Image: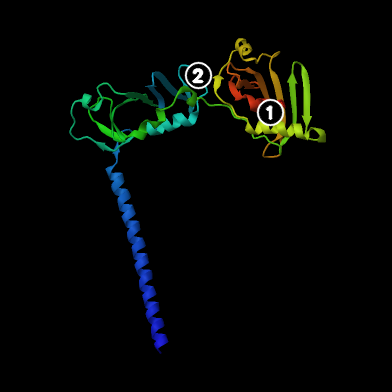
Amino acid sequence: MKKHRSLLILTGALAVLVIVYLGLGSYNRKQEQKEAETAEANTVTVTDISDLQEISYQYEGNDFAFAKNEDVWYYTKDKEFPVAQSYIDAMATSFGNLTAVRELKETDQLSDYGLENPKYTIHLKDSEGTETTLYFGNAVEENYYMTLNDKEKVYTVSGTSLDTISYEWNDFLQKETLPSIGSANLKQVTITENGNQTVYDSKEESQKEDLAAIAGGFGAASFGTCVEYAVKDQKLASYGLEENEKIKIEAVYEDDDKKEQTLTLNIGKLDESGSYYYVQLDGSKMVYQMGKEVVENMLNKGE
């Protein structure tokens, strides 16, 4: 009888705990929803531009100006410049949907906030031709004072708002990429130098060690600094990339779908430091630097 009574007590206690747990869960959800609604209500919207078409500004003495054509961003002063789209998309999102930490209700002179002569001025234009100008002044803790257009209102905005413009030219340049090549998928390599061809084939047992060394070079290969993004034919000689000077590497490999592909890479001369070769994908206008050791492994000239 006592055991039965104890079991009933335990069951009742468990039921109470379940009810309390469910009640707390429901309360927490309501609190979270309430906090989210409060945060949304307190959000100070500075800009709400859904279709930005132009962005221009100055940073570290350089003028940057980008415009969009058929959903593709380009550099307005040189359409050949290969723009890394993700950087400008992030910029458009940041400045097109800018929110403030707070709006200052009582303001002093613009000069008190560094807004008479702003540190950063950003010009925006949407698809309808409407222009918006953002001005960023002094830093205040982790934020910046900012205003826009007629400078009637002053806000503080997060310092991260300017992160998307904190880049140099080379950061905005979209480099080409190399496929993933290693010992497992490299089938054949043909190296042409001074009119002479050397072929390494994975089917040849005697060449497996050489091919493994070459594969090691490909596995470590990546494009370094881009020294030319639209090189002219008459300038190829300065990089050792003229037809009669360059070394050509043709690599046959299997892609992820087990289909054979061919990569052709042109190797020029060493740069002035002697640490990098000038290289170029066949048919490309872009010239890069690539580490000496990596290139010489691809050429099977490594020590």
Mark found first going from the N terminus, 1 or 2: 2
Pinpoint residue 286: horizontal percent, then vertical percent: 58, 20
As measured in the structure, the alpha-carbon distance from the residue carrying label 1 to the one carrying label 2 is 36 Å
Pinpoint residue 280: horizontal percent, then vertical percent: 63, 21
Tell which residue pokes out farthest to the front in this image.
303
Q: Quadrant of the C terminus?
A: top right
Pinpoint residue 258: horizontal percent, then vertical percent: 71, 39
Pinpoint residue 209: horizontal percent, then vertical percent: 76, 34
**Residue bearing mark 2:** 79
Secondary element at image label 2 = loop
**Residue bearing mark 1:** 297
Q: Is residue 17 left or right of residue 254?
A: left
Tell which residue pokes out farthest to the bottom in this image.
1
Q: What label does residue 130 carry, if any?
A: none
Residue 187 in sight: no
Depth check: give the residue in front, 109 or 125: 109
Q: Is residue 35 left or right of residue 214?
A: left
| Residue at the image point whose x is 55% and y is 22% from the top | 226
Secondary element at image label 1 = helix
Give the answer, above or below, for where 59 lies relative to 33: above
Q: Amino acid at mark 1?
A: Asn
Give the answer, above or below, for where 42 lies relative to 20: above
